[in-house]
Amino acid sequence: MRTSLVWMAGGLTSAALTPTALASGWNMPVGVTALSRDIYSLHMIIFWICVIIGVIVFGAMFYSLFRYRHSRGAKAATFHEHTSVEVIWTAIPLLILVGMAVPATATLKNMYDTSEADLDIMVTGQQWRWRYEYLGEEVAFTSNLGTPREQISGTDEKGEHYLLEVDEPLVLPVGQKVRLLLTSDDVIHSWWVPDLAVKQDAIPGFVNENWVRIEEPGIYRGQCAELCGKDHAFMPVVVEAVEQERFEEWLAERKEAAAQEAQGVDREWGMDELMERGEQVYGSVCASCHQPDGQGNPPAFPALAGNQQMLDDRDWHVDTVVNGVSGAAMPAFRSTLNPVEIAAVVTFERNAWGNESGDSVQPSEIAELLEKDE
Amino acid sequence: MASTLPPKPTPEHSTATAGGMAEVGHARPRGLMRWLLTTNHKEIGSLYLIFSLSMFFIGGIFALVVRAELFQPGLQLVQPEFFNQMTTMHGLIMVFGAIMPAFVGLANWMVPLQIGAPDMALPRLNNFSFWLLPVAFALLLSTLLMPGGGPNFGWTFYAPLSTTYAPPSTTFFILSLHIAGISSILGAINIIATILNLRAPGMRMMDMPLFVWTWLITAFLLIAVMPVLAGVITMMLMDINFGTSFFNAAGGGDPVLFQHLFWFFGHPEVYIMILPAFGIVSAIIPTFSRKRLFGYASMVYATAAIAILSFLVWAHHMFVVGLPLVAELFFMYTTMLIAVPTGVKVFNWVATMFRGSISFEPPMLFALAFVVQFTVGGFSGLMLAISPADFQYHDTYFVVAHFHYVLVPGALFAILAGAYYWLPKWTGHYPHLRLSQWHFWLSVIGVNLTFFPMHFSGLAGMPRRIPDYALQFADFNVASSLGAFLFGASQLLFVLVIIKCVRGGEKAPAKAWEGAEDLEWSVPSPAPLHTFETPPDFHPHRH
Amino acid sequence: MWQAIKSVLAAFLGVQKDARRREDFASNRPGTFIAAGLLMGVVFVVLVALVAVLAAR
């Protein structure tokens, strides 16, 4: 028993000395935060403990299988219990576990310390995209899957970051403590980036907290980890970590763009502009349920092409997009899309795929509607 | 001891045994009615086993649909909607339709034989609890044909995906789970009543074979948690159809409450699927080591300890839902503690083999593979218990690898081991040796090729339940898919072995295995329809 | 009762002297052991919870 203890201790030290024991791509990434490294080393320590116990147990087992074969004329012994051996092999695992619980507890306490953050980001899961809001900065946007459908269906060749690319990544400054506040508009999602060792459920009606301090600039990719319906596989997370100055420039650009978009609300939009913008919005927001050809996927997702109720009643159409349908899968887009986008997408839906209402919706109408509701 | 010896059989008993009670008493129904109306534990046991085998193949086909789609990145064969229905149905069918009924079938056959009872304590209830199952699963499978498709929210059916956002067929899914749950509870009541009341005179609790012990404890677990499942699905039913808001945050409910309730059922449930496996393996290893089980008493204690701890660990499935720190620590500590009694079991099996006289008949091969592979699943379980690391493991293929190692090369291999062990008792013939060995080796290769690479794809970052994945996971998935098809195909060999074994083969004597000790080996092979109508003369080991 | 508690603790550890166990199972009153088991179960939960609370500080 003593020799095996020494053996175990030796294994533990060697585990600590060689943190990158397995080739990358087969193992958990070490990651780019202090916490991700802590978690990685916990992972490797417990892994080596398991390996050592496994070698001892399976070693003893295969030795017995080989040495005491019936075919070699082995005669069975008659012992069937041994109290001190049993006490020892109950106590030793217990001690190992206590030894393991200590560093795990320390790491966990660190993970739960979300105090004194430099930047707060609201992360909202929606079927099937992420929305990011820089709290106190008036900057918010949604982040959709960037991989073209042709790559998924196999008509185009798949790119390097297939399914792990988005139209607009979450941009974060390096070296800053960023607090993530997570929630959801519909079902439970889970925001996960392996290199940051952050995985946290986004739950409708509740706000979860987590935090990250990224140490190296770079692009870090992850995915939704909680089954959230049909396109669960198609809502990636991409984080672009940049230096602080670059981050501030980027934030200023976004604010500028938001201001310009707000001005667009007041002017009169032409049909062609609305259709063009609407097609773009439809593709990134609506097509995953109602399909690119507007045929939907009944009964959960009704067809829009040839939808008589929608074509006959423009106000109902606008209301459905703005306020959603309660108790069904259709979300309210009043806070996720701006008036220009809502007006454009409604106009597009009324005049695409053989729908010929010929009418349009102006951004100013939507803005008025939203104001009235508030 | 003398005071507890069996009473001398009365003359009444003797006449009844002379020609078999049933033949004398009344005419037995024939054909279909015989099976519909049977109250015989052996026939009902066979029904359970056949039912479970067919469900195993149906669930297996669903798994192969999943693996075929995942063979390559991109969407080739099925759409995501259908893929989600396949993963969900695969899980539900395998858990509730294959593994659990298989263990109940083994209990029906073997518990009365192992304790020297003439039948189960409540034979009509036994018939009822079996025939509920085909109804439940016919209903469940029929949802696949309904508008909007079958359940598509995973076998854990987290709200609100399974309530507000669920397909219309969900109400039928709830009903079918209710029926299956009633069946389980009735089965468990029957098993407890049998074990507590019908043991052969002189057989004390600590003389019972471990398969009986593990099933006794499992049955208590079933009775404790099945009502919780019934409660949680009834709350879903209300949310869907009657406008309540148990799990709907917009109405003041809590989606996380669903998970607490589900896992309070779900965690004991996973032990329900493994404890009887421990019992089977604890019968087989001593038999083929020709040596008594090491540490019988500690095996019983460890089983009870695992069962009790199973009620205290449920939230380790929820480490990333945002539990308070104290809860996170509590559940991490209790979960780590489970490793201790589980380890004791493995050590005891190894110590049983140590200085034994070991031979490698097919049941022993499967039991040995169980020990190794279950331990691998136990190791990944220990890793998952470390809460900070679980933030990386959670909901990835690492978890899929973990629970499949415990359930397939674990529980399923134990069931196969049990089948090979008791087939001579059931049919009177030994299973065909060569075919059994082929079945074993192809299964071992297939199952490990399927599930071992999942550890790597999970650690590398592949989430579970996705129909399409990034390119860096492609190689692991090719291996898993090939392994799955090999494993699936090699189970056809098992069917062949059973058919051959029923129809003929080398004749087995009453004591089919040299080292076998328990009471079932004192009745002829094949076991006649009625056994132990007179209680056997039981001589306990000196435990 | 004290005897039953000692036996339950031994069961928690999974190890018991053969003679003691024979003695325990000779008594025909499982009630005491069930009560002791429940009591020690509660004590166990409280103990682990206490450790968790202290560790979380």
Image: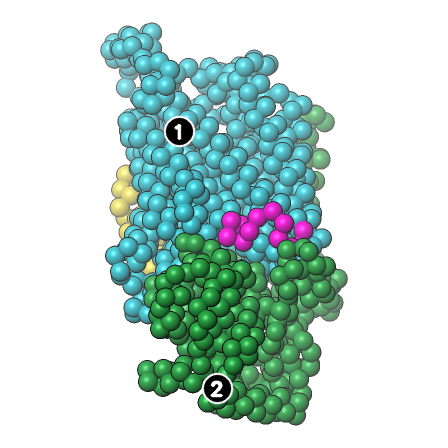
Chain colours: A green, B cyan, C yellow
- In depth, the one of A308 and B509 nearer the eye is A308
Task: For marks 2 and 1, give the CA distance.
Answer: 78 Å
How many discs appear?
2
The residue located at (66%, 37%) in the rendering is: B486
| Label 1: which secondary element | helix
Q: Position of residue A307 (x, y in %)?
A: 41, 60
- Look at label 1 and name its amino acid: Asn
Residue underneath mark 1: B108
Does the image show residue A257?
Answer: yes
Q: Which residues are magenta?
A: B72-83
Q: Is residue B78 magenta?
A: yes
Q: Chain of mark 1?
A: B
Does A14 sit left or right of B21 as displayed?
Answer: right
Does B198 sit left or right of B372 as displayed?
Answer: left
The residue located at (53%, 42%) in the rendering is: B62
Q: Position of residue B244 (x, y in %)?
A: 26, 61
Q: Position of residue B223 (x, y in %)?
A: 32, 44
| Label 2: which secondary element | loop
Q: Is residue B534 magenta?
A: no
- In depth, the one of A164 and A88 nearer the eye is A164
User: Which SS does the magenta portion mostly show?
Assistant: loop
Circle on res. A268: 2
